[in-house]
Every structure is written in structure tokens, then in C-alpha cells.
């Protein structure tokens, strides 16, 4: 009798696809948890986006396994389908990346979308424990390491800078814009040539501002070129 019940339960699981249902439920939980963190952080890919990505990748992961294992059917390799899913997710993630001045925004959101899809494929392939463990790592990375990342961006960097300007450009014309962004000039040497005036500097300031001031200098009409770092 117990063997008969086990057989019946196994048939019910196979017919009703309760294993896939469980994986889809876990996908909603995992995608929802990560999406909620992104939503609360004010990022472009939030709750619904991450849930849909994880659920869709789970379904496609399951289909790829079943199609590849179907007897008498020459279907595509599961690895090929998984690779196509990840390529498609790459295009979706690219939509979250924006450039604002000299700063690129949205890279973390794009990476989150990519890893959510990877967890969905793992769920579809039946690796629920691995997907859940990865979700915990992702949440810890997003929530716990955010303050650390901001601290690093605020940390002071000391880098060399070479600025070629129009002949006769005063030093103050360059140092004032730098200081307005919190970047200080520690050392400077000036070299005059017939075609330009070159400033060799050592500057110090917040890491997040260094790239911004480089773009700022390059946009000035009296600056011929600027290289920082």
C-alpha cells in the first residue's frame, strides 16, 4: 500500500507539474525580495520587473530541460537555450544603463537583472537550493555593501592630471571649477609653448568627482585636452 501511494503521488507530481509550480513560487519570492530592495532604493528595475524576469527564466529553464530530454525528439541543447535567455536579458539590462555627465548609472540594476535571470534558470533546472543561496548573497551584497560603496566613492583620491590649455590661460581659470566640485590642487607646474600652455598637476578629491571634473575640463573652450589619472 505505501508503495502504491508513493507511485500515485509521483504520478500526480508529474501530471500536475507540482515541481514546476514550486519552482515558480520560489521564483516569485526570490525575484520579489530582490525587486523590493531595488524598488526601495529608487532604482529603475523594481518589484514587478524582477519577479517577471525570474518567473520567465524559470519557465524557460524548465522547458529547455524537458525539450532536451524528450525521447525521440531532436531538440536544442538546454545549455543553448540558457545562453539565449542570458543574451536576451543582457539587452533588457542595457535599457537600465544611463550616462549622466561623466558618470554611468544603472550598472548595478543591469547586473541585478542578469543574476535574477540566472537564478530563474537554476530554479527551472531544479536547483532550488543553489538559487535560494544565491538570492541571499545578492540581497546581502545590495543591502549591506551599499554603504561601503558610498564610503569608497567619498574617499579621497590623489591622482596626477595633465591639462593642455590655450596660450596664456591663467591657472585660476582651471582651479576654481575644480574646487567648486571639492577637488583641490596640491601641486602644479606650468609649461608655456607657442601653441599651448601645459599644466602638470597633482589633484585630490572625492573619487566620485574625479571623472566628473575631467569631463568638465574637456568641455571648456580654453582647454585643448585633459587627462586625469
Image (spheres, rainbow, N blue to C red):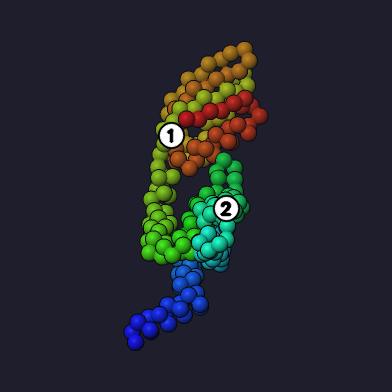
Q: Secondary structure beneath disc 2?
A: helix
- Residue 204, numbered label: 1
* Image height of 61 relative to 154, above or below: below
Which residue ends up furthest to the left in the rendered image? 2
Residue in the picture at 52% in, 38% down = 211
Which residue ends up furthest to the top in the rendered image? 194
Provide residue 42's location: percent of width, then percent of height: 53, 60
Regarding residue 53, the answer to whether it shows in the image is: no
| Viewer-nearest residue: 209 or 3 | 3
Q: Which residue is mark 2?
A: 84
How crowded is the residue under tag 2: few (<14 C-alpha within 10 Å), some, or many (20+)?
A: few
Provide residue 34's location: percent of width, then percent of height: 47, 63
The first of marks 2 and 1 along the sequence is: 2
Q: Quadrant of residue 219?
A: top right
| Viewer-nearest residue: 34 or 221 | 34
Which residue ends up furthest to the bottom in the rendered image? 1
Numbered disc total: 2
Query: Disc 2 and disc 1: Cα gap in Å?
Result: 45 Å
Provide residue 228's location: percent of width, then percent of height: 50, 30
Q: Foreground mark, 2 or 1?
A: 2
Amino acid at each position: 500500500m505505501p508503495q502504491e501511494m508513493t507511485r500515485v503521488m509521483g504520478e500526480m507530481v508529474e501530471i500536475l507539474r507540482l515541481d514546476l509550480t514550486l519552482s515558480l513560487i520560489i521564483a516569485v519570492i526570490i525575484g520579489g525580495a530582490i525587486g523590493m530592495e531595488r524598488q526601495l532604493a529608487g532604482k529603475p528595475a523594481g518589484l514587478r520587473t524582477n519577479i517577471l524576469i525570474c518567473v520567465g527564466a524559470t519557465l524557460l529553464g524548465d522547458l529547455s530541460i524537458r525539450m532536451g530530454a524528450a525521447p525521440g525528439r531532436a531538440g536544442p541543447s538546454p545549455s543553448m537555450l540558457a545562453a539565449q535567455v542570458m543574451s536576451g536579458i543582457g539587452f533588457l539590462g542595457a535599457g537600465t544603463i544611463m550616462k549622466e555627465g561623466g558618470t554611468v548609472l544603472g550598472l548595478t540594476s543591469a547586473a541585478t537583472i542578469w543574476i535574477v535571470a540566472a537564478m530563474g534558470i537554476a530554479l527551472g533546472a531544479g536547483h532550488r537550493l543553489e538559487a535560494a543561496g544565491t538570492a541571499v548573497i545578492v540581497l546581502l551584497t545590495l543591502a549591506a555593501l551599499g554603504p561601503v560603496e558610498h564610503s569608497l566613492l567619498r574617499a579621497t583620491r590623489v591622482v596626477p592630471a595633465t591639462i593642455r590649455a590655450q596660450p596664456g590661460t591663467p591657472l585660476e581659470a582651471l582651479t576654481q571649477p575644480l574646487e567648486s566640485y571639492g577637488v583641490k590642487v596640491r601641486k602644479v607646474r606650468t609649461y608655456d609653448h607657442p601653441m599651448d600652455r601645459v599644466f602638470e598637476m597633482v589633484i585630490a578629491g572625492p573619487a566620485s568627482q574625479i571623472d566628473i571634473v575631467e569631463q568638465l575640463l574637456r568641455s571648456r573652450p580654453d582647454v585643448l585636452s585633459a587627462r586625469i589619472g
